[in-house]
Amino acid sequence: MSPAPERIRIFDTSLRDGEQSPGCSMDAAQKLRFALALAELGVDIVEAGFAASSDGDADGIARVARALRGTGTGVCSLARCRPGDIEASAKALEGAEAPRVHVFIATSPLHRQHKLGFSKAEVVDAAVRAVEHARRLVDDVEFSAEDAIRTEPEFLEEVFRAAAKAGARTLNVPDTVGYTTPAEIEALFRRLRAALPAEAILSAHCHDDLGLAVANSLAAIAGGARQVECTINGIGERAGNAALEELVMALQVRSDLWPYRTGIDTTRLVPTSRLLTRITGMAVQRNKAIVGANAFAHESGIHQHGMLKHRDTYEIMRPETVGWARSQMVLGRHSGRAAVNERLAYLGFSLDEAAAERLFARFKTLAEKKKEVFDADLEALVLGEDASAAGWQLTAFHLSTGAGQGEQPAAAIELRDPQGEGHFGRGSGDGPVHALFAALTEARGMHVDVESYAVHSVSSGEDAQGQASLRTRHHGEELTASATSTDILEASALAWLALAQRIARRPGHAVAPTRDTASSEVRA
Ligand code: KIV
Ligand code: ZN
């Protein structure tokens, strides 16, 4: 019998490297929700944040640490080589079953000289002290040499040897600026593997500035890495990190080249990717590998012909393997509650009875308008349910584009507040969306400073549902909301309302008065 293939540990940093990038911030509750999904996906370690960066981050890590007990997934917090950072990490991880403190310091000449002002000896000294300190507080310590790729290889060996001796179990090699190539990183890992103690686990952390993060991570594995650091949908600083879904599927589909296994349940890849999109409002491009809407779509006649003859002609993996719909079973106006509920459960939603009933009514309305209701439609309906549960309801709206009459676009809105009282608002603007938001501002009695606005379709066909996503910054915190409808202007209004509700729920929130509510304070 041939021995079981070696295991590659999947270290997910969506909640740290990913979350710190523009458009991806999450609050503690959202982090918790996503961490549970990562555990269900089967990742080995979740890097839940950088405890010393804020109280909110420390709280988020602590909540994740407690929630992941008993799941088999470890929890990690990042720390600079400073006692305060290490202590904040260990404290946030107190409730964790398998806590890991991840200390890092930059090692490249550029960073030593311009960022730290440290000599080589000072870098080694800081790394050793930090690892020793962390080891006094937790058993499992990872050490990263930031900008390792642009570090002199002999110095990198020296730092890693010292960190391993001080007690670091995992030695991480970040390509912090996404500069390396597959051949170069493979050679570096071979060199490090030969030079460092066999019990030290080598790890790769590749950024995607040249679009090579996944290829470089795979090359690192070929050179001896047994942990890879990655994120769902490849989110992360600048161009992002190696995409977990691509890495895992490359390992699985090309096991002839990389004979390794991971603990990932690949059928959870698409639902996890979608959950991240729902939480952050950051959509993946349609042609994104594995999780993009077109990843398994065959449009051209030649491809469709080939697929009908034999799926392998144009399909290197089955969509079901990564969590796309098991079949093309389509829901429609004849479908009953059981079929809808079964589909919802498959898509990872659990609604209470009342919410399921409300959703079913909305499903029926949609099914009357739309011949076929796809998974994405259903998912969008649940999100609409979330938006309408925000308290304030959109009861009516009217828009005139002003086109041909030489007038500005204008909107009139009617809202119902949680007490059932109606509120009206009118507004005009440079375009219909601008007018719509002005009318909402008046009706809701609060101003939302929309920083970014995007609309994309989330299902197929001419009657596809559109998802509108909005982002704002509130007291330095980034807040997002999205909503869906077959009418993109309605989706935009619902997303605006959901965002207003999120702002109103922030502790101690006092709304900036609008022109017409000069002295009033509005609370949720
Ligand atoms: O990219 C990087 O260097 C990092 C380290 C902190 C691990 O994210
Ligand atoms: Zn990074």
Image (spheres, grey):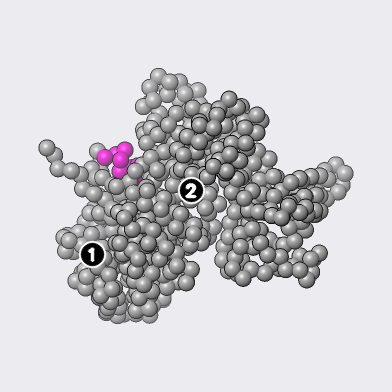
Inter-mark Cα distance, 2 to 1: 32 Å
Residue corresponding to mark 2: 275
- Please report whichever mark, 2 or 1, sits nearer to the chain's N-terminal start: 1
Q: Answer above or below: position of 211 versus 65.
A: above
Identify which residue is drawn at 33% across, 46% down.
Answer: 264
* Comparing labels 2 and 1, the label whose residue is closer to the camera: 2
Which image quarter: residue 185?
A: bottom left
Q: At which x and y percent is residue 73?
A: 32, 55
Residue 506 in sight from this viewpoint: yes
Identify which residue is drawn at 36% across, 52% down.
Answer: 39
Q: Amino acid at mark 2?
A: Leu
Q: Looking at mark 1, is its residue's CB closer than 8 Å to ligand 1?
A: no
Taking the magenta stretch, the answer to whether it contains residue 249 is yes
Identify which residue is drawn at 25% across, 72% down.
Answer: 135
Query: Do callouts 2 and 1 mark residues in contact (Cβ within 8 Å)?
Result: no
Q: Amino acid at mark 1?
A: Arg
Query: Circle 1 sits in a helix, a strand or a loop, which is it?
Result: loop
* Majority secondary structure in the magenta region: helix
Which image quarter: residue 175?
A: bottom left
Q: Residues within 10 Å of mark 1 (few under 14, many from 20)?
A: many
Q: At which x and y percent is residue 79?
A: 37, 71
Identify which residue is drawn at 65% across, 54% down.
Answer: 391
Q: At which x and y percent is residue 406?
A: 87, 47
Q: Which residues are magenta?
A: 248-255
Which image quarter: residue 132?
A: bottom left
Residue corresponding to mark 1: 169
The N terminus - image quarter:
top left
Q: Which one is nearer the viewer's eye here, 209 or 327?
A: 327
